[in-house]
Amino acid sequence: MKALESAARIVATQEENAFVDGSRPKPPLLDGGGAPTATKQASYLGRSDYITAHVNIDEDDATQYQDLGSRQGALHNFEAKIRRNVSTLEIPRGTLRQSLLRNFLQRCRPWMPLVSERDLDRLDAKNQDTLLVIAVLVAGSIVSSAPEAADHGRRCYQRAKVLFYTNSEQNHLHTLMATIFLQWLNPSGPEHISIDNSSFWLRISVALAHQMGLHREPDPRLTEAKLRRRIWWTLVTRDNQIAASHGRPRAINTEDSNVRPLRLDDFEGGDEDALLFMQSVLITSILGDMTEHYRRGTLSVRKKIDFEDALRRWLKAVPLSLRLHHPETMKLNEYNFKVRQLHVLYFTALIILFRQDSKDDPPSPVSLLAASFISGAYEEYLTYEDIAHLSVTSIFYLMVGALIQLSYQRFPSLATHRSQEIEIMTLSFQGLKKRFPSAIGAERVMNQMMQHSTTLADTPQSIRMVLTPEQKEFFAPFGPELCRKWSSVFDTQPGFLAGIDDFAGAGNANNMTMSVGLGNDHEVRKNGAIRENPAPMMADPVWGNNASLLLSQDDEALFSGGQALDSVGRWWWADWVPEADLDFLSKSI
């Protein structure tokens, strides 16, 4: 802790270089010997916590030597020459540049609230193509629909890599933030090893954060204390999402951190996305913890109950401004891209938590409804042309929903609206793979499962599933508009959702049963009223009248070519399918 206090004293004495909280940018000064000066922050060292002697270790004194690894002399000149050469790469200017900056602020910053519009405006006015600005342009290009944005984004990325590896940015916080923004670019899927994907840059970000001591609660006297907390929780969120999407170990162990949870006063005044980010930190942490237990085989019954309680608490704590449905009328609120993305995380966690252990059993009713909600959200993305504005982790959420829907195709009484929902998933994958190669592997997984599902015999009996009183709380704040399975799942008795006030503002709900395949596909009866279901957007069926998958010639060529099934996501779905399915999949892996 002495080292942390020493580092805090050093930084507290300087005029803060990070402009993000309103201070003026000022490059740090390095003395010839490389020892810490008033403007050079010491690296975090915590070894004094477990190494003792008759006197305490003086970590401050340990830094007082020449940094042999500092950039100087021939190496410095060589790096400067590299930067001059790469400066010939054209950087977006004019209206395209403004478009990319605006896209970053609207689509990326809500999930990474590290720089403000005021900061970017100030940098842009000075035409400063620093590592941080170039990384912002890279992220903005990923969520841009402009035809030339992708090419400019790739050039910016190449320039950002050179600036990073030649140590062009002396402000370490700016360097760290840049590595976070670069995680929006994924030129290759997780099935292939890469030094350019989000997983690679995440681990660079975490390594820098640990060096800088961001895993420890910052001294409140530091000018950038609030920024440091936001950076840390951004990294935690990204780590949870990427680890869950890939089935890999997390880079951060939160047991090593004592950074307190975020509060509203950690954000700049008037930041409308503060609550959104705080909620995303919570739900991604639940998802990351849950998938880690599944991957390690340590998800006990007690731990599963704890996760169920955590999801209920999260849902109850969602602010009114971030709700999907109005708490009194239960009508779907006006489309909000960010709110939809937030709830897709929640529904994904539900699907994974309530997956069935027995391969021959129908899907859990909780997973059934959650998958239909995900389908509804992606249908809205398609309608509002927002598929191009999603992050790469949205591919995993889409695949989770798609595989659950495919898993109940062998139960005809559960397969209502399957043509529309599968078509939504197919079109969504087509849109996502235009930007992210990761979507190609996930789409192949879905296509393989779709093709094989036609070889399985249908289960003839009608399936009737029941939600327990505890399970119904997971859907208490929602209505039917985004969920095609709603009318065919919930009992249509009048008032079955009346009185959910204790949970979402209306009273205690009676025990309700879910009857699959019994309701009218076009009507929903709620509190005695009959409403029209939204007309399905996608009418082109991918399933024939005999419930067989209709393959195009290209699809048939894909499957007949013996191409291997990609491994993305296999860690969590392979044990859902029957033994016959596993035999089929093993032949193509």
Image: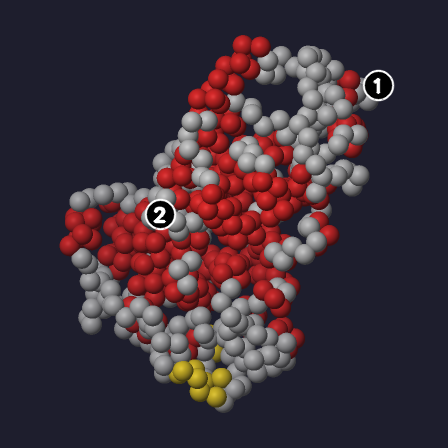
Judge left or right: residue 477 versus residue 40. Answer: left
- Neighbourhood count class around disc 2 (C-alpha, 10 Å): few under 14, some 14–19, many 20 upward: few
Judge left or right: residue 499 versus residue 555. Answer: right
The quarter of the image holding the C terminus is top left
In this view, the residue in front, 346 or 81, is 81
The x and y percentages for residue 19 are: 67, 38
Q: Residue furthest top?
A: 74
The x and y percentages for residue 450 are: 27, 58
| Relative to 436, residue 303 above or below | below
Q: Secondary structure at mark 2?
A: loop
Residue 93 at least partly seen: yes
| Relative to 376, residue 553 above or below | above
Q: How many labels, in total? A: 2
Residue kind at label 1, given as amino acid type: His
The quarter of the image holding the N terminus is top right
Whether pointer 2 and pointer 1 mark residues with C-beta atoms closer than 8 Å, the reply is: no
Say which label, 2 or 1, has the lower sequence index.
Answer: 1
Which residue is painted at 47% across and 34% down in the image?
200
In this view, the residue in front, 113 or 1, is 113
* Res. 30 image quadrant: top right
Q: Which residue is mark 2?
A: 147
Residue kind at label 2, given as amino acid type: Pro
Q: Which residue is mark 1?
A: 54
Nearer the camera: disc 2 or disc 1: 2
